[in-house]
Amino acid sequence: METLPAEDPASVHLQPGDQLKVYSRWDSDSDSAPGSSVMSASATDRESNPPSSAGSNTESGSEWSSSTNDLRRLTSRRRRSQSRMTMVKTLALIHLALVWSREALTLSDLLRLVKEGHIPYVNAYEELPEEMKLFGKDALLFSVLSIPSHNTLHREAQALVQFLQLPAFPPISRQTLLHPALLSLRFLTDANLPDELHRWVCRLMDRAGMADPRGFTINPQSHGILPRYEVQTAALIIVTMKLIFGLDDHTEWELSNQVSSQDDSDDQFNLRRWYRLMQAALIRAQKKADQDVARKQWRTKKPIFLSKGEKNLIMKRKRNAEQVQMCFEKLSSCPAGVQDISPSSFRFCWGDKDGSDGPSLHHMKVDRVLTQKLGTLTPQNSLYWHPALKSCSTLRKCRSHYSEVEATLPRSFVWLLQLFSFILDVKPYYLYEEVLEVERKVFGAKHAMYPKGKKKKRRTETRTGTSSRVVQKSGGKS
Amino acid sequence: MDDLEEHLGLHKHLVDDDGDSSDNSSTLRGKKLRLPLVQPMFVETKKETGFTQSCRMCLEQIREAMLHHRWQEAAEYMACYPQILEDKACYTTKQYKELIWRASTEILHHHPKSTIEDYNIIYERLKHSGFKLYLKVSLEHSFHLMLQGKFEDAKQHLAAAESWRYGKESSAQIQRTKLIQAYRSLLDFIIWSEKKVVLSNNNTVDALSENQSMHNYFRQASVNLKGILSNPGVWDPFILSYVEMLEFYEDYEEALKVLNDYAFDNSFPPNPNAHVYLYKYLQRHGAPQKKLIHVLKNLQLLVPSHELMLEYTSLLLQSEKQKNTQKALGIVLEMLDFACWRNNLDRRLGEHHQ
């Protein structure tokens, strides 16, 4: 999808009046900035007017006491931080709105659009019309020096779901674009994997008990957990690849050798060939992404100042910097900043056209890695490895044991994690935890596999990072 | 700036820790390392924002491009870098401004399309970007202009820098101001000598006004130079220019006095060139042999292998005194100690023996 379709206000079940009043002075029909694109219109609909008086904070504080039931759950620190609207919360709200309207834009896509500048975020106040003057300490809310990470934004959105006390979200069924069944198609295409793998991803999803729409629909009354759609989908794809190809640094290459040694190997999916193509494209894309980060311009034409005295100083510095910049722009005949690229859902472009990252492998068949067993197709590879699945009980404090375990994992698996981390723009440990989660669901490891007495011992083993690789037979997985 | 200070503090802490745990920790324990810490600029700090991350990565790219002599690429990234000057925290640290100054000038030196205008812009902007850099950048700017032959502009900038004051004058500032004064006087001299050449070439009616302006320059230069030369230091080019001007105006006593002071003042660092200049001057003005010998004696003490030692020996031989000839032999033998004279002196020795 090339453009972001405008949100249809009619499909949103929120009452603009009561809920939004709690935050700060909102005008639900604030005029959106003139001349901004369709996308930013949906963004500014949700943006607040800058609080014109300091009193708004205390007001929202007093309205707070009215709904104390759910707020007791929140700690006092979060209560204080939640009394102010921030740019991050705005983005979180947009994400919730997108999930509500079941658009196929995931959180990763949203963040990518923000990074590329298609959604005004870094200097969003520049889009505000001239009449709106920004001053005072609250104006500093608009000065943004970082784009939030996936994790941060997800947590904010999660907190928002609880806070807003929304009714149940519209259900995410298998036909919805956000559901892994359809989202995985998109990722398979982006990663240049054959379309036939989709069938296996869906099978895995059923096996893991993740096909139930209730698992993906947010229901604030019952559990109110906001699923991470794209991360779960990517984890599903990785586990599928593990099932079919093994990914233990041996099996996949042997299978690949088998495929290439056959005569009619032209339309068979060959992992080695895929890896070469993908690695080259990945390296190029990573380099370009790094260059874009280096070139990104964060400063704005209209800086915010707290006082008049500061204004002169800031403007003088700005003039200095701009002069130096213009001098070098002229010298290198290359404007500063990142080139404008049109927004796209895909990171890579596969095909035969000019500027593509490589030939497309979508139409390849995966027959060779499958065999007939008991009348059904199963992967040839019958061994499956996974690290210790017992969830760390101190997961609140330690985010992930990935950094400890990474050296012991097979390189193919680590590379695949890095590939999908790049496509989603998350850290590898994040994706790794989700892969573990999927594996837990598949193997039912949540239910006490180990007797109670041994629990403590298991915990310490996990923590010191000795990964016990349990090799199970995955026969009969149909 | 908070980040950087915290960072440096963190680094110092680490260094101390390393010192404690190293093998020869018994000597290092309790002592702070005296080596200057290289300030790490490419290391991620905990509180890094997207903005500081962008700046850091941009700097890395600039460094890579410069090290590999990819000047076009360096210029491109340099165009993206000045946004760091707008950040309050980074602005107050001198490090970034100095970095931009030095990196920009380096890129301009090597980039094929750089013009004098670019240099001017960069120097002007960076001069006014901070107080600590003003004098240094002014000086470098003037040097650059001098190299391009634009003496008037250079002089203008130096004159502006000379009269610039900010806050309490640190000793570094005072020294730099002296340097600026000295070079400004040198520029006066250069312009003066240019005018002299012009004057000698055409004997037209304008001679009088030219003379007048020449004299003005001379006066400006001499006032400053006199002041500068009273400070201990090595002022070779300045001395020469001053003496040349004085000779032109036939103020021989002053010239002699200046040269003598320069050569024999104990507060000045020992400078063999001073004696050379004095000797040459005396030679030009036909001083008696005794005086010449006296000067050269000092020179011999300082630099026994000097070229002028040959003249010294010939002077001594000319005087035809017994002890002088012995001395001459001694000098020649001393010169033989130096490899460069071994071949040439054998002949001399032979001469002397006769």
Image: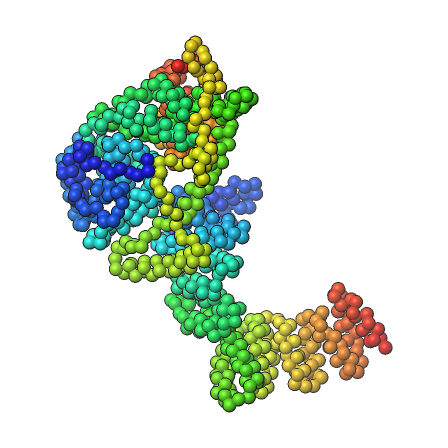
Q: Is residue A258 above or below residue B316?
A: above
Q: How is the image coloured?
A: rainbow
- In depth, the one of B281 and A267 nearer the eye is A267
Spot occupied by residue A417 in the image (x, y as percentages of width and height): 43, 30
Give residue A162's position: percent from left, percent from top. 22, 31
Taking the spot 30% from the left edge, 34% from the top edge, the residue there is A105
Residue A253 image position (x, y, % from top left): 52, 24
Q: Nearer the viewer, residue A472 or B181?
A: A472
Question: In the image, B303: left or right of A335?
Answer: right
Write the residue at 28% across / 25% down. Answer: A175
Quadrant location of the C terminus of chain B in the rendered image: bottom right
Q: How many marks?
A: 0
The quadrant holding residue B278 is bottom right
Name the residue furthest right. B354
On screen, residue A455 above or below B245: above
Asked whether residue B137 appears in the rendered view, the answer is no
- Rendered location of residue A19, percent (x, y): 16, 36
**Any part of residue A79 in sight:** yes
Asked whether, in this view, residue B38 is left or right of residue A80, the answer is: right
Residue A218 appears in which quarter of the rendering?
top left
Residue shown at the point (44%, 20%) measured from the top left: A243
Which residue appears farthest toward the top when viewing the image?
A: A374
Residue toward you, A68 or A289: A289
> What residue appears at the point 40 percent right and 25 percent down from the top-left corner?
A195
Where is B325 relative to A211, above or below?
below
